[in-house]
Amino acid sequence: MSVETPPETADCPGCGKPRTLCVCDALGRIDNAVEVLVLRHPQEQDKELGTAGLLCRQLAHATLRTGLSWPNLAKAAGRDADTRRWAVLYLGTAKQAPAPELGPLVAVDRDGTPLTDQAAGLQAIGGLILLDGNWSQVKALWWRNPWLLKCRRLVLNPRAPSLYGNLRREPRRESVSTLEAAGLALAHLEGRPELADTLAAPMRLLLKKVRALAPQRPRLDRRRFRR
Ligand SMILES: [Zn+2]
């Protein structure tokens, strides 16, 4: 009988990260009421700093799909889904940052203008779609999936910059990681402020390990949008 030993370089099956960066100890288990669907661009291959996998591993109701286009929401979600009850979190079209008094999550129209009735805009959202990749990858996902236009549209209005700090240069302050974006949005939609912190725990541990492993490493300055 032979026991297959995974090579040293194999990723951790628990968290999907390289073994030297394993963050299983910090993975939480969250029973989310608002379902999450992450559409990941096929070229988004950041094994070290990518966060979509860490997000979906922690949520009881989450789907991670890798690809460029799907004919409709149902195909992307893998089941029947009503676009009117789903919202896409998109940061690309807002012409200017929403006013701080609007809060961390803002419902906008197709032009990126905040809706007058925010309570109605944020009400009865059953599912949240996030696009995962760098700036141009996210734009490609947006344009290749025109059914996204039928979904409700949300933008983040975070008060703090991304946890990535100087590990990654973000083009704009509100460009947080996919994990942080989902955490902020779910916390607000579900009225559970602690969700954002709980979800971000493995990302904090990951960044601590990355920084400890390579304190002198030059910062990763490929322009990132959301990962
Ligand atoms: Zn692990």
Image: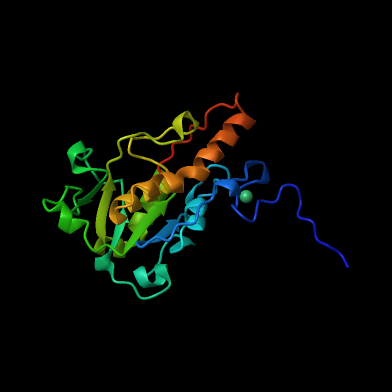
Locate residue 169 relative to residue 174 in the image: left or right: right
* Total marks in image: 0
Residue 38 makes an appearance in the image:
yes
Which percent across, then down, holds residue 78?
43, 72
Q: Is residue 140 above or below residue 125?
A: above
Q: Is residue 43 above or below residue 175?
A: below
Which percent across, then down, holds residue 172?
34, 35
Q: Residue at x 57, y 31 (%)?
A: 211
Question: Which residue in the rendered view is the most extreme toward the left?
Answer: 116
Q: Residue at x 20, y 48 (%)?
A: 112
Q: Nearer the viewer, residue 190 or 219?
A: 190
Q: Residue at x 53, y 36 (%)?
A: 207
Quadrant occupied by the N terminus: bottom right
Which percent across, then down, holds residue 41?
46, 54
Q: Residue at x 22, y 56 (%)?
A: 122
- Its colouring scheme is rainbow
